[in-house]
Image (cartoon, helix red, strand yellow):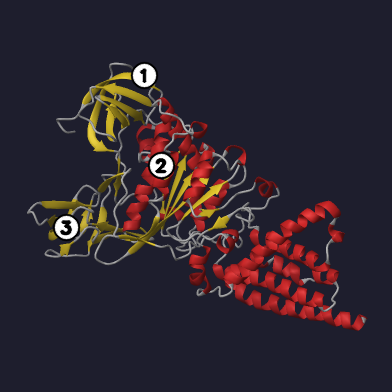
Amino acid sequence: MAANNAEGRIIKVAGPLVVAEGMGGANMFDVVRVGKSRLIGEIIEMRGDKASIQVYEETAGLGPGDEVVSTDMQLSVELGPGLIKNIYDGIQRPLEAIREKCGALIERGIDVPALNRDVYWDFEASLKIGDTVKPGDIVGIVRETPVFVHKIMVPPDVEGEIIYIKSGSYTVNQMVAKVKKSDGDSVEIKLLQRWPVRKARPYKSKMAPGRPFITGQRSVDTFFPLAKGGTACVPGPFGSGKTVVQHQLAKWSDVDIVVYIGCGERGNEMTDVLREFPEIIDPRTGQSLMNRTVLIANTSDMPVAAREASIYTGITIAEYFRDMGYDVAIMADSTSRWAEALREISGRLEEMPGEEGYPAYLTSRLAQFYERAGHVNCLGSDGREGSISAIGAVSPAGGDLSDPVAQATMRIVKVFWGLDSSLAYRRHFPAINWLNSYSLYYDKIADYITSNNAPDWKKQSSRALKLLQIESELEEIVKLVGIDALSASDRLTMETAKSIREDYLQQDAMSPDDSYSSLYKQNAILTLIMNYNKKASDALAAGADLEKLISTPVRDKIAHMKDVPEADISAEFGKVSKQLDEEIDNILRSKEVDE
């Protein structure tokens, strides 16, 4: 700790907010130690020599006159080998290491480094003495897990000539290379870097998203796709499946790294995540999903201030992996609870409240989080690219989308997966309402998908969505006058739309074959449904019997296509397509015989 650290005394304690005087030498966002227990806090407001501090731990026992000492450092995260597979709280305290040190309950003021200082990592140098390096250049690698290679990068503010580098086993705090800068100073490069969480990490340029974020969830990939580097929100009322949707995305998305932030949700939901993820086998690698996952657990019973910091901790870790050239998905569950923490802190600061008591800067803070997502050209000489795709759950009270957090989020993100409790109650999962959801990336990624195993994707998906919209209109007529009032073609439309809903969009997260569908499998199933609609419509126009078309046995085969293993989908698609042609032809021939 530096000798000139600002020292002050507490004059007010209001829950997680502490006000101290005599802090004229401190700066905004400095980390401070509060009271005899040295609780960790952060300065969030300065008025003269008085500092308002949000304390990330329980403040019981603090009182006027207790000492406050600034560390002269902003709230930062430790970045380096050891992040993967770890479980942190909202300010990057390693929960497993804390449990080993003090048991099941976190002691106040405990100070455990985020990255283990005793573990040795095998560093493989990729450069040599005399090489010139720029910010972001990769000096070597560490094979952190069986499926993840950790790239050791030159810090963003360092440029010069390597005067020392050596492969070997190192702890995160030991020097692996040294760079001599143009002004003659030398900088040690370690496996460990630190970065302030409220400051975005730099990159060369941001690019327009153009690659799809493949989730394996048919309702998402087909109708409301997300692009890598894109932003999405999952709003919905209690019990509509927000957390399950985010779990599915974390499990199955085609990204290299997943950062999952439980910011304010119930403890039992986070417990499920902590228990499930180590047991899930990643279909891409055959290893445990934890081998490419970082978990941040800050549940609703943990300190409010740490919840506010948790999404910044998560996005900074995600940026670090993005800078290595990886595709990263960050899940925030939920930003509504994060906003409630923001509202509580704002209220204790006695700021002018905005709508429903939320601070006036709610939208700008949300935008600062989502804007740190994106597909970027990373720093470094190798021209690598990386992406962060941000997906935030929103939990408006009663599912009311006029909620300020939901409205602010919808103005920022480009994909809206609106969950519907009525679908959830009918056991239709994922309960994404196809009538009010949307994606602004649909046209941008259409070329990529149609050129990769799904040539009819755009045409088929737009036709299917149109049928679902027509079905909604026809249902209003049916409620008034009954289904017998519909024409034969309208009844066929209703049957096809039902097939799309039940045989395609409805997905079983517990089924090994239905939990994930590749783009090829999705395209095959939807093609069969739409081919049935076209052939049946043509047969109906030729005078075929509607009841025979509706009850034809091939529909049952189409309904079970989603349970066919990926390896067998091509062969089964051929068989069912042939059966569809034969049965429709038989129905037409039987009509001719009857005549």
Q: Name the residue under label 3.
A: 159
Residue toward you, 165 or 582: 582
Looking at the image, which residue is at 39% across and 31% down? 106
Looking at the image, which residue is at 12% across and 61% down? 161
Residue 78 in the image: state x and y as whole percent.
29, 45
Locate the N terminus by quadrant.
top left
Q: Which of the two discs, 2 and 1, sits closer to the camera?
A: 2
Q: Which of the two discs, 1 and 3, sits closer to the camera?
A: 3
Give the Cα distance between marks 2 and 1. Answer: 32 Å
Residue toward you, 438 or 376: 438
Q: Which of the two discs, 2 and 3, sits closer to the camera?
A: 2
Left or right, residue 278 beside residue 349:
right
Residue 419 in the image: state x and y as whole percent.
61, 49
Give the vertical position of 79 relative to 463 (above or below): above
Left or right, residue 166 beside residue 374:
left
* Sequence-first disc among 1 and 3: 1
Residue type at the position of mark 3: Glu
**Badge 1: how crowded within 10 Å, few (<14), some, or many (20+)?**
few
Residue 79 in the image: state x and y as whole percent.
30, 49
Residue type at the position of mark 1: Gly
* Sequence-first disc among 2 and 1: 1
For residue 61, the mark is 1
**Badge 3: how crowded within 10 Å, few (<14), some, or many (20+)?**
many
